[in-house]
Image (cartoon, grey):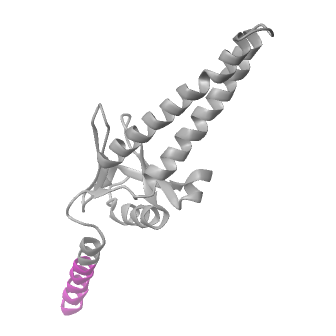
């Protein structure tokens, strides 16, 4: 009996130590994305829109007659529009960064995001099946990652949290797997 009591006491003490470490790593308040995320998104916007502008020039030049001002118009016109869209993307990215947050507690992961339409996704840790940490080429350049959480259920069965630092994403992944509960599928 005494041995069982000591074993239970040590389990309780271990849970208390894990809980204290959990609270010291993760704040009680929602956390923002990595400050490098807007820069990575701006580069992504710029690449996408310049590719679209080059395609627009190619398509419109194919329809233009070779003589006169038509060809000059179709070659030059897409560039100011592309630059305007890049700047619009930069403003949008900044606002998206300011309105995005995540919060990991003992029982759930909550993700808030959205500029015009706000979205709050709450994932109970007991529903977590497995997690992934993904990095694309631009994310590697900026040392960022996307945490992908696969859950049991239909709606939000795959939840993505973009804009985390690589170390943070891996730490959250490890913490999710530790805390997902014994009844996880």
Residue 147 rendering spot, x and y as whole percentages: 45, 53
Q: Residue at x 22, y 78 (%)?
A: 16
Viewer-side residue, 15 vs 112: 112
* In this view, 44 is above or below 103: above
Q: Residue at x 27, y 81 (%)?
A: 14
- Residue 183 appearing in the image: yes
Residue 4 drawn in magenta: yes
User: Which residue is situated farthest in the front direction here?
Assistant: 68
Viewer-side residue, 179 vs 165: 165
Residue 60 rendering spot, x and y as whole percentages: 69, 15
Count up the numbered dots. 0
Residue 24 drawn in magenta: no
User: Which residue is situated farthest in the bottom direction here?
Assistant: 2
Magenta span: chief secondary structure: helix
Q: Quadrant of the N terminus?
A: bottom left
- Residue 157 appearing in the image: no
Left or right, 11 with respect to 180, comes to left
Viewer-side residue, 100 vs 151: 100
Q: Residue at x 24, y 91 (%)?
A: 3
Residue 125 rendering spot, x and y as whole percentages: 31, 55
Residue 76 rendering spot, x and y as whole percentages: 65, 23
**First to last magenta residue range:** 1-17
Quadrant position of residue 177: bottom left
Q: Residue at x 62, y 34 (%)?
A: 50
């Amino acid at each position: 009996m005494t041995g069982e009591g000591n074993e239970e006491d040590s389990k309780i003490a271990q849970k208390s130590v894990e809980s204290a470490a959990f609270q010291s790593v993760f704040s009680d308040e929602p956390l923002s994305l990595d400050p490098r995320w807007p820069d990575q998104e701006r580069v992504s916007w710029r690449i996408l829109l310049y590719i679209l502008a080059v395609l627009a020039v190619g398509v419109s030049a194919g329809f233009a007659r070779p003589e006169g001002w038509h060809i000059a118009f179709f070659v030059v016109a897409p560039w100011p529009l592309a630059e305007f869209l890049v700047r619009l993307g930069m403003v949008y990215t900044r606002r998206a960064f300011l309105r995005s947050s995540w919060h990991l507690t003992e029982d759930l992961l909550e993700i808030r995001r959205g500029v015009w339409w706000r979205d709050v996704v709450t994932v109970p840790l007991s529903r977590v099946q497995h997690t992934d940490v993904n990095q694309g080429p631009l994310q590697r350049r900026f040392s960022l990652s996307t945490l992908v959480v696969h859950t049991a259920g239909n709606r939000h069965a795959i939840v993505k949290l973009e804009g985390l630092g690589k170390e943070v994403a891996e730490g959250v992944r490890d913490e999710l797997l530790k805390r997902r509960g014994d009844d996880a599928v």
